[in-house]
Amino acid sequence: MSTPSIQFDRRSFLKVTATTGGGMMLGLSWAASAAEISEAPFMEAMTFNAFVKISPEGVITIMSPNPECGQNIKTAMPMLVAEELDCDWSKVVVEQAGLDSNKYTRQVAGGSGSTPASWKPLRTAGATARQMLISAAAKRWNVSASECSTSNGVVLHTASGKKATYGELATEAAKMEVPKDVVLKAVKDFKIIGQSHKAVDNKKIFTGKQEFGLDFKREGMLIGVVARPPAFGMKIKSVNDSRTKAMPGIKQVVRFGNKVAVLGSSTWEVLKGRERLAIEWEVDTKLESSADHDAKMAELLTKPLEKPQRKDGDALAQFEGAHKVIESKFEAPFLPHAPMEPMNFFADVREDKAELIGPTQNPGSARRAAAQALGIAEDKVSVMMTRMGGGFGRRLNADFAAEAAEVSKLAKAPVKLMWTREDDMTGGIYRPACHYLYRAALDAQGNVKAIHVRGAGLNVGNPLRENNFPAGAIEHYLAEGHNQPSNITTGPWRAPVHNFLAFAEQSFLDEIAEATGKDPVQLRLDWLAQAEKSPVGSVPYKIDRFRNTIELAAKKANWGKAPAGVFQGFSAYFSFNTYVAQVVEVTLEAGQPKIKRMVCAVDCGVVINPEHAINQIEGGLVDGLGHAMFSNMTFKDGVPDQTNYDTYRVIKMGDTPPVEVYFVENELDPTGLGEPALPPLSAAVGNAIFKATGIRLRKQPFSLNGLRNV
Amino acid sequence: MAEFTLKVNGTKYKVEAAADTPLLWILRDHLGLTGSKYGCGIGQCGACTVHINGESMRSCALPVSAVGKAGVITIEGLSKTGEHPVQQAWHEVDVPQCGYCQAGQIMSAAALLKKNPTPSDADINSAMSGNICRCGTYNRIREAIHVAAKKVKS
Ligand code: FES
Ligand code: FES
């Protein structure tokens, strides 16, 4: 047997303690076997604030308030607290907090915002608890607090040589006055932040003990599946459930709105029961097909918008007198999120309260939606988050939580509703389909005088991020975005709008470079210099940070110096306050492009947990590549054509090239990482494929362009 | 409904279920072994991977009636406390993002290493081609399999 890679001392072998908050805390120790774990109940942990509890044995429990969907926030947030608390990270136990709007703010996994929003508050919580521990020690030793210091979970008084562990001080310290203006550490003094620490739930994940939403179980709970309209735009005409009710294991069939829930004691039985439902559906609104969608978006691209999202100078006049105009159109399909764990939620609705448990990126909106569906006040609804098997934005919506609440209410029983993969893929809330038109007006010297972007998307809201670079560098800039309502439901999908807009924009910049004979990296640097010297309109990106990131990617990838037979593509994008630049390398094998290497430079300020940050960025690139290459969601008469992983192709291991990640080093406040690495990738791929083959890819997925593989 | 006797992780269980119930739901609903995950139900994602007679199998596509006397090992039974070299390697490389696919990935990797203790990248890509990771941790999985292979060797 190999030696465990991490060891904890005896004191950290806690198994299950019932500390305040009622959460079960599981042992951290990799090496601990059940027999080694103390059965003795632990003493009550002292609560310092919403984030910190310390037991007299010295166990430090840090609450992680935000939902965990794979961004490893459950490790990062407690690191922020532990840094300023100045404790031994290996002795920290992390506990997932439930939704509690009195204690916590922004309990959301979305908008790449968890880390930036918690950067100061969580460190302050740690520093505050540390100050209270110091005060308690000073009082005990009758010395001035200013003479005391801390190190690794111990308060020290150097002059007298006295020391006490946080555990020894916990009971007194928790009663000390809460200090107001605590001083936070300087970046250079960080000991925990900036070091790679393993994910706190690793062991549970690797041994099958980690509970996800679908694993949740409660005595007496019914398992349910729901029959939903087979096409967008349909509704129920009639339901005959007699055959279902006659099936073994079926406990109840309940109709709610345009859906029918089948409830029973086991998954297989309810799945078979659902098959026996005889439901007649009828057209409610309109049955839309992808061909209609494409035609509508193409039509909108010919139409000006009365109130453009951005208008610098007079772009249209520039096009009138242009020496040369380049113009391209780009297309992206609807996409399901397809997280590995399909939607599900548990609800136990009683007369005057409701308990919800499950995987949600936004527990606050789950509470709101459930309260609304049940017609009760929000404070009667509790929400506990389980770990999520992926989110990608799908779990920001609350439809599945509200559904569970509704069904539990009707069934008068605790219910866990599960979606099959088919339910999940065909049940709506997609990345909106979008088309873009890009145009550039050139003068006789090849200078870009004007850029015009026009977008059209289905249920997209604004299909543009109109202040994107190179806006700010171009004198005449026009951005118009159309929204086309559709009955195909949409929602945020990892880096909403950016995820496809970046492809169109960054591919088009490559086309401009090609048409004007400029190097794509140099073109961007020149425009940044222009935006620095004479900015046009609003410039939300920081020139120097963008420039540093672009230069770092170019340097690390040896931009422009690739060996013969290796073709490079470049892309750079600013979103969620994070700067990303990427180089993708492609070779040709039997005439087919093969992606060999993906290099990514990122400026996200201070990096909290480097290994997890890299993992997140790698995931963003792989995700970006997979969807650009393979993934497609189409409709015929309102019915989704793709229903499961057999017809909906996602990226696999063999499609995944090596990824290199580099950070711009600085001491700036951290910005988000969950999303920004994804948007630029597909353009870097497309631009590299153009270099290799001369084929310009403007439609996703690329597999539609006759490319067999990568 | 029929009664089936199953041997899972070395323990014998008697379960009452319809003969066509996939092993996955027997494990999860009847035996409370929720480490094997549901991802697709049609043998396409690998989240439900278990070992049957040492071979990796998709438990979602295997009716309980077809299991017979074969011994089933799930992620819960791969090792006593997570000391299998593959589990250790997964920790060293800090593989997961959401973690949902990882039990299946680990089971497929463990089965691969049993057959081929020194797999090449190409061997790994092909053996793992039935395991989807929607979070895109493939490069880490591949690296962790190499790390585990070294552990097995030493
Ligand atoms: S759930 Fe069995 S292969 Fe996907
Ligand atoms: S880690 Fe999320 S699906 Fe693999």
Image (spheres, rainbow, N blue to C red):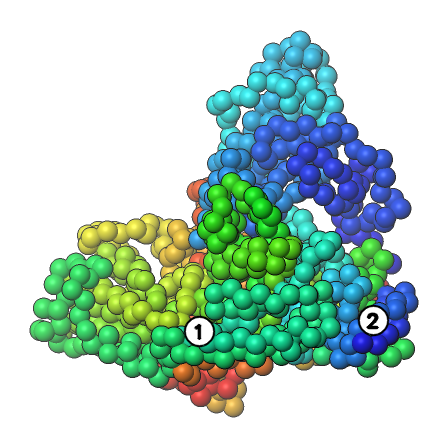
> Which quadrant of the figure contains the N terminus of chain A?
bottom right
Picture disc at residue A235: 1
Q: Please, which chain is the residue tagged with disc 1 on?
A: A
Residues at marks 2 and 1, common chain?
Answer: no
Q: Does A17 sit above or below residue A572?
A: above
Foreground of the two, A153 or B3: B3
What residue lies at 60% left-to-right and 11% top-to-bottom? A144
Q: Secondary structure at mark 1?
A: strand
Q: Residue B106 in the image: x percent, y percent?
A: 73, 66
Crowd tier of the residue under label 1, counting other residues whose Cα lies within 10 Å: few below 14, some 14–19, many 20 or above: some
B144 relative position to B84: left or right: left
Q: Residue A628 in the image: x percent, y percent?
A: 45, 74
Q: Residue A384 in the image: x percent, y percent?
A: 60, 47
Crowd tier of the residue under label 2, counting other residues whose Cα lies within 10 Å: few below 14, some 14–19, many 20 or above: few
Figure quadrant of residue A409: bottom right
Is residue A142 something that shows in the picture? yes
- Residue farthest along the top direction in this orientation: A142
The type of residue carrying mark 2 is Glu
The type of residue carrying mark 1 is Lys
Picture disc at residue B16: 2
Gap between marks 2 and 1 measured at Cα:
38 Å
- Residue farthest along the bottom direction in this orientation: A590
Figure quadrant of residue A653: bottom right
Q: Secondary structure at mark 2?
A: strand
Is residue B75 something that shows in the picture? no
